């Protein structure tokens, strides 16, 4: 019998502070309408002074444990997807473990906006190899610390937040019951100058070029996952794409000929939260009761590096 690794619970933490488009228009030359028309973003959450990626990861981790009805001692390992760690070492995962009292391996994975897919894939493979039963995976970012607030081309795009899932391993065939069916993982360092950031100079992006790559690679991940597992687009219940731009999500939906209600969107209030965007979208959908057990879901992400990939799963 093979192992099936499924998502049994979701959780999140969004910082209390919010910033609307109109508020941004007070300090750079932009408008609410431009931002909505070009991105779908209305507002974003931002960490407050002194609030770090470790703090929001801990809060999302506590939320998902509560939602799962689990104790720290039930968790075998912790994986954090982030490209904004607040200190060199120990890792954000170690801070989460210390705060929650979780023993076992823990590590951070930095793959920018592709981070949650890379991390879920790593966790799933380690779980089946090590025969771990339950693992905590968090996607957490405070990209506001990388933003040059004078650059209207990037400062309107990003938000802070943390999304979390608990993965559980059981015997079974995910195609028949629940769990990850397949992952598609890709990347290329060749185009790294098209999107980069640090906390001295802020984020820089060639938006138009990144847009084209993002649509192409997320589309390709979805197509590859469906075709190599003998599914058609009609079989899909939901697509959970990285929330970078509503127009990217719409373009993927259009190419796949899927109706709008199958394309999950949280970008209006979350903005682009990088590695947190997919777990935040999973949690928001789960909270609304959108997903039913056995639903076929495809996720896809694309980010700096470039990194990209997707996962096909039965909820
Ligand atoms: O998460 C990782 C992956 N990230 C992405 O996938 C993001 C991909 N890129 C995008 O989402 C879009 O390219 C952006 C939202 C970043 C930009 O939208 P766009 O439609 O590609 O606009 P653009 O960069 O081509 O700029 C169009 C115009 C320019 O003015 P001119 O040259 O036509 O006069 C910009 O200077 O819009 C101007 N502009 C703005 N105007 C008002 C750029 N930013 C702003 C702004 N407000 N905030």
Image (cartoon, rainbow, N blue to C red):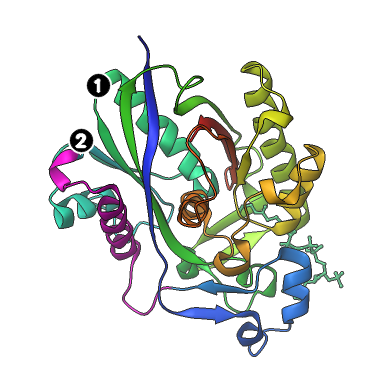
Determine if residue 206 is in view: no
What residue do we see at 26% from left, 34% from top? 134
Reading the image, the residue beneath label 1 is 130
Q: Position of residue 247 (x, y in %)?
A: 76, 56
Q: Residue furthest bottom?
A: 26
**Is residue 13 on the magenta stretch?**
no
Residue situated in front as seen by the camera: 153 or 281: 281
Q: Residues within 10 Å of mark 1 (few under 14, many from 20)?
A: few
**Horizontal relation, residue 42 to residue 124: left or right:** right
Residues rendered magenta in the picture = 47-74
Q: Quadrant of residue 85?
A: bottom left
Tell me: residue 33, above or below residue 303.
below
What residue do we see at 44% from left, 52% from top? 83
**Is residue 72 on the magenta stretch?**
yes
Q: Is mark 1 within 8 Å of ligand 1?
A: no
Reading the image, the residue beneath label 2 is 76
Q: Earlier in the sequence, mark 1 or mark 2?
A: 2
Q: Residues within 10 Å of mark 2 (few under 14, many from 20)?
A: some
**Horizontal relation, residue 85 to residue 40: left or right:** left
Mark 1: secondary structure: helix
Mark 2: secondary structure: loop
Q: Position of residue 252 (x, y in %)?
A: 74, 43
Determine if residue 295 is in view: yes
Q: Which mark is residue 158?
A: none
How far apart, in angstroms, are the residues tagged by discs 1 and 2? 10 Å
Q: Position of residue 171 (x, y in %)?
A: 33, 18
**Horizontal relation, residue 58 to residue 312: left or right:** left
Disc 1, disc 2: CB below 8 Å?
yes
Quadrant location, ligand no. 1 = bottom right
Tell me: residue 76, above or below residue 91.
above
């Amino acid at each position: 019998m093979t192992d099936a690794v499924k998502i049994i619970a979701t959780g999140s933490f969004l910082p209390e502070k919010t910033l609307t488009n109109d508020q941004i228009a007070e300090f750079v030359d932009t408008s609410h309408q431009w931002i909505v028309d070009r991105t779908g973003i209305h507002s974003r959450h931002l960490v407050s002074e002194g609030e770090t990626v470790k703090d929001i990861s801990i809060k999302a981790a506590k939320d998902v444990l509560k939602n799962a009805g689990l104790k720290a001692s039930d968790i075998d390992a912790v994986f954090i997807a982030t490209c904004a760690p607040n200190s060199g070492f120990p890792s954000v995962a170690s801070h989460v473990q210390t705060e929650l009292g979780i023993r076992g391996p823990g590590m951070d994975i930095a793959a920018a906006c592709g981070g949650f897919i890379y991390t879920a894939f790593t966790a799933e493979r380690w779980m089946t190899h090590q025969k771990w039963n339950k693992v905590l995976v968090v996607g957490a970012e405070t990209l506001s610390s990388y933003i040059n607030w004078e650059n209207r081309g990037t400062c309107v795009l990003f938000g802070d937040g943390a999304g979390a899932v608990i993965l559980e391993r059981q015997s079974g065939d995910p195609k028949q019951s629940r769990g990850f069916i397949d992952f598609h993982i890709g990347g290329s360092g060749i185009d790294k100058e098209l999107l980069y950031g640090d906390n001295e100079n802020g984020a820089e992006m060639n938006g138009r070029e990144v847009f084209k790559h993002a649509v192409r690679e997320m589309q390709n991940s979805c197509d590859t996952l469906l075709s190599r597992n003998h599914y058609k687009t009609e079989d899909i219940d939901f697509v959970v794409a990285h929330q970078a731009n509503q127009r990217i999500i719409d373009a993927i939906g259009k190419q796949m000929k899927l109706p709008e209600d199958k394309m999950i969107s949280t970008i209006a209030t979350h903005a682009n939260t990088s590695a947190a965007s997919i777990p935040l979208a999973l949690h928001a959908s789960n909270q609304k009761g959108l997903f039913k057990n056995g639903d076929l879901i495809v996720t896809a992400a694309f980010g700096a590096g470039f990194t990209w990939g997707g996962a096909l799963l039965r909820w």
